[in-house]
Image (tube, rainbow, N blue to C red):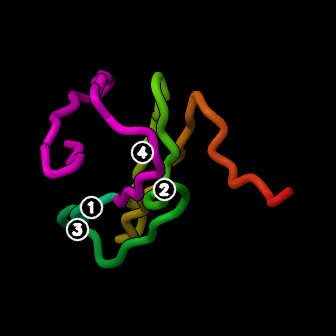
């Protein structure tokens, strides 16, 4: 599920959702999750939170992977975008 501006949008595994009517700008995001039964600790890495710059036609993809090994639940995220997400340096 994606909660964008107070609206919960359900996204099925392996599917995509187009969100229309978004104003151009920079938006922050965060990932909420629960650790599974049997996990005694957690670890996160990658793009589990941050900000994205959006303009007309921007496509954002976040791929999540998780493992549970020796009681440690690890969540990793990788973000890709159709637009340059780097912060430009001043002239």
Question: Magenta residues, as a range?
Answer: 1-30
Is residue 39 in the magenta section? no
Q: Picture coordinates of residue 16 (x, y %)?
A: 32, 23
Q: Earlier in the sequence, mark 2 or mark 1?
A: 1
Left or right: 64 in relation to 89: left
Q: Picture coordinates of residue 84 (x, y %)?
A: 66, 38
The local crowd at label 1, few if under 14, some if 14 to 19, many if 20 or more residues have their Cα within 10 Å, is few
Q: Residue extending furthest front?
A: 91
Disc number placed over residue 64 in the picture, else none: 4
According to the image, label 3 marks what residue?
38
Question: Could you tell me which residue is drawn at 80 percent across and 58 percent down?
Answer: 89
The local crowd at label 3, few if under 14, some if 14 to 19, many if 20 or more residues have their Cα within 10 Å, is few
Comparing 40 with 49, the one in front is 49
Q: Picture coordinates of residue 47 (x, y %)?
A: 51, 55
Q: Residue extending furthest right?
A: 91
According to the image, label 1 marks what residue?
32
Q: CA distance from mark 4 to mark 2?
A: 16 Å
Is residue 19 in the magenta section? yes
Q: Earlier in the sequence, mark 4 or mark 1?
A: 1
Q: CA distance from mark 2 to mark 1?
A: 15 Å
Q: CA distance from mark 4 to mark 1?
A: 12 Å
Mark 1–mark 3 contact, CB under 8 Å? no
> What element does badge 4 sit on?
strand
Q: Is residue 83 above or below residue 18?
A: below
According to the image, label 2 marks what residue?
51
Name the front one of labels 4 and 2. Answer: 2
The local crowd at label 2, few if under 14, some if 14 to 19, many if 20 or more residues have their Cα within 10 Å, is few
Please identify the quadrant where the N terminus is shown: top left
Q: Quadrant of residue 39?
A: bottom left
């Amino acid at each position: 599920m994606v909660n964008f501006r107070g609206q919960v949008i359900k996204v099925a595994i392996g599917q995509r959702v187009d969100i229309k009517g978004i104003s151009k700008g920079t938006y922050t995001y965060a990932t909420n999750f629960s650790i599974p039964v049997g996990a005694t600790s957690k670890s996160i890495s990658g793009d589990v939170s941050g900000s994205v710059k959006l303009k007309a036609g921007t496509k954002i993809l976040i791929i999540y992977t998780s493992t549970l090994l020796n009681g440690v639940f690890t969540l990793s995220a990788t973000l890709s975008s159709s637009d340059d997400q780097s912060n430009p340096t001043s002239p």
